[in-house]
Image (cartoon, coloured by chain):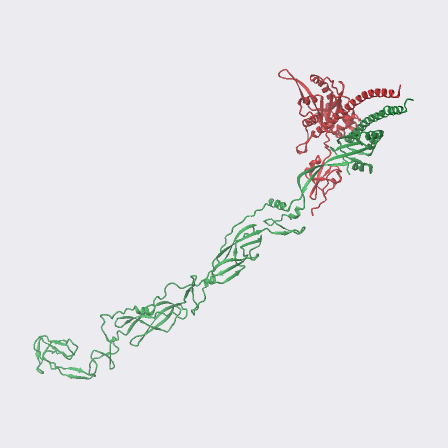
Amino acid sequence: MKLYHITISFALIAFTLIIISDIRTNNLNTVIDNKKEIDGFIDVAIDDAVTRLIEVGENNKIHINKEKAIESFFASLYSSFGILSDREKQQELALYFPVIAVTVEDGYYLYYYDEYNGADDNTYTVRRWSEKLPYYYEDEYFLYGFTLSDTITLLDKYCKLDSSASQKVYQMNYKDVGEKYANVINSSNHFLFDNEKFETLRKTTIASLIENSMAYYISHHNKIASNHGITYNFNLPPISNNQWMPYLDDCSIFVVFQGYPYGNEAGDVYNRFASAGAKISKDTLFFIEQVDWYLLYHKSGCPEINEKNIRFYNESYFTIEECVKEGAYACPKCSALGVYAPDYTAH
Amino acid sequence: MDNPLKLVVDIILAIIIILLFPLFYIEQKQDVIIQTIVEMETEKLVQEVRRKGYINRNMYEDYLEILSVTGMLYDIELEHKHTSFEPEYRFRTEQEVIEEQNNTYKGTNEYHYRPISTDIPHIEDPIENSGELNTETNESILEGAIKTPADANHVHTDICYDGEKHFHNSSCDRTYHPVKKRTVKERNSSENHSGCGGTLHFYSYVNECTKCGAYFQYSQTTCSGNCDTFAYSSSGGCSCSGYYTYSCGKTEGRYYNGDTEVSPHCHLKVINITPTHPIQKVYISESFITTATVTYQDGSTDIILCNTNDTSDSVVSDKTVKLRYTDGTGATMSTSIVVTVIPRNKTCPNGHVYNMNSDNTDPGCPFCRGYLESLIISHPSSKRLTIYKGTTLQENDVILLATYMDGRKEYISTGYLDNLDKDYVGTQTVTLSYKGLYTTLQVITKRNIRLCSVCNRYYELYPDDTDPGCPYCEARTPIFTGRILEYDDKYYRADIFEKIYEGNGNYYFSHRDYLTMTVTNRKKEWGERYLGSIFGGIRDRCIHVVNGGYIREEIHKLR
């Protein structure tokens, strides 16, 4: 037994083992990379969707354009996957999104697949929007309709608030309700009186409502998907609070992506629940002030606004871009990142 | 031992294959793991920053700690891309501002034409040309005078003579000649009187005178001559008579003034004198017509020339002038005429008729003195004037040169009429008029200017003199063009670290900013280096992670 025999046999054995494990790790790597890639695609797509969700219409009213948002979501997705020109592949991919939820101020919409029997006795699959589903909560006396902000709608079931029975529906800020009808609502730890409780209840109500609806439609989707050759069993994954909470103050989009096969083995699928908020910042308004020969825009919390002797325009703007379109530079006090006015006086 | 060389080679080979290669291999694997770890951590950090909207020191240092577990040194590069919008302001050129001002001008600027006229100066020099001037002169009248003869029926009477008719009477020297009467021979006989030359015819009964024996008759006869001798008898008597021959030297029946015989002066004596031209109008120094028609006693008329003392030296009107004429008889008759003396007039070369002076000197044609022959503009000589609105031509030194018909030149700076429209800005043709002549001038009216107290330049006002504001000062204010510039600001690790390390602050991002992190290892591990020296193509960096994403949250913190 020479030394070189040992060396050679060592080399042979090591080589084999190394190759095998190498292959495996490489596979894993690829899968992980792939996953990351798809994660990235979905992030980008949902971000794109959310930017298109909010439109400012006339009179500065905010209008939710969910059709455009979904359109841009899918467009972005298809372009990331590289199937922008391939109709069939696009339809295939779309099947892996059983449901998409869009929340608006006082309700939410679901975008789901539905089947119907056509006139020629064929079943057609179509993608459609549900009607607006409200955020409701019921207790023994009232029916509450929540919104994404602090307003609630009350349905007085037994006319407790107004004994003359003329008014059944109230719509106001929940704090006002607490103040006005404190005597009527006899329990003192009613959630209407406590801000934290109210918030928690609101968010959990909304979350659970959306979850339930989504779960219903996802399971509904199973049948449809199986018709198209997808054998995956769709179900709503458990979603942590972290994924819900930040987005329940604002209009947002929730996307469920399930069953996308990507791995090596037959059973490897990609699942993701993605969410994004529109961040229209209804509370971040910009005001434009006239200074000398140029205009300045201020954020709503800027201390400069309280000065009495500045000339303001009456309109408020939602985005910086709009302000700039009017010709405004950024206020150095409240905008850290912005283009400041050049140092030039006309005289 | 067989071959120490073989042994050595074996050992070397063994070391290489069994020790070194596995080490290299393990190291490679390590790289993969490290790469994964770094990727994951970077992803986590990026997601966190995206979610939170800011990065601070703690977040970053936690990340670094995890990275340091891998035992390698990394170069971490952060890039923060922020889209900025900037409004585009630009300066207007002064032309633009002026144009804008002109476009917003609401007033009107219209030209109103006003006709003007002046009259030719009124010069009065009335010429007496009623046409009643004497057309004839004394000479011409006299030449054409027709004497009318004496009245055919005129019989000389006593008044025709400047004397008395002589009748032979006893005072005359006479001689008596008895005349023997001739014998009347017959009844029809006649007798020639040699004295008177007449023939005496006898008629009727003739008797014989016993005295002289002459026959005589009764009836009267008349001598056809003028002698006084006739014989008649009344019933029987013969009155013989002779005849007288007078030697008084005078003839009976003739008129004598004293001893001289006078002839009838009835053709000389003027009984009536009438001026031929009783009303006359003459020029100065022109003689009157002093002819008069005289009627002589005998009825003949003649036109004679009278004398007068008056002259036509001065201008008079309806003056009575006496004409005197001494006729042939020495008597002076006078008559009068009414004379108007008018001054002479002259026609100047321009066709004006004017009166001469009283002393017949030429005062110069007053019309030519007063009328203009031509009117031209002397200043400005180019017939073009540029003035400011609201000023008059007089203020702008417009001078006219008037040439009168008598050649005089006069420079006129005031007193002329013009139809300058003072409220119009632009080019207008102004008509100037003086004493009836017209000339034109092209006037360019400019808008009034004002000095700007701020920039000390002159600028034009509006045509109606309202102030648009100094355009130069206006042009220094930039205006918004309506376009915005969109550009990406990039902030790098140094900027971010500056924020988060100095003062422990947070580096805030804005919504939709893009954060990119690039992590590469700084140097190779020892194994890599050896490999790198053998295989020159292996890259220096083997850990390379890039991660990035849009920031989803924006914290509104004030500076």
Asked whether, in this view, residue B185 is left or right of residue B337, the answer is: left
User: What is the quadrant of residue B487 in the picture?
Assistant: top right
In the image, is residue B436 above or below residue B158? above
Among the chains, which one is green? B
Among the chains, which one is red? A
Q: Does residue A11 show up? A: yes
The tally of labels here is: 0
Looking at the picture, how far across and down is residue B195, in whole percent?
15, 80
In this view of the protein, which residue sits in the foreground, B212 or B38? B38
Q: Residue at x 55, y 48 (%)?
A: B110
Residue sitting at the far front: B2
User: What is the quadrant of residue A199 in the picture?
Assistant: top right
Residue sitting at the far top: A121
Q: Does residue A129 show up? A: no
In the image, is residue B309 above or below residue B445? below
Looking at the picture, how far across and down is residue B508, in whole percent?
77, 35
Looking at the picture, how far across and down is residue B274, in whole percent?
31, 70
User: What is the quadrant of residue B72 in the picture?
Assistant: top right
Q: Residue at x 63, y 17 (%)?
A: A118
Looking at the picture, how far across and down is residue A6, in whole percent?
87, 20
Asked whether, in this view, residue B125 is left or right of residue A343, the answer is: left
Q: Quadrant of the N terminus of chain A?
A: top right
In the image, is residue A335 above or below residue B134? above
In this view of the protein, which residue sits in the foreground, B512 or B18? B18
In this view of the protein, which residue sits in the foreground, B255 or B394? B394
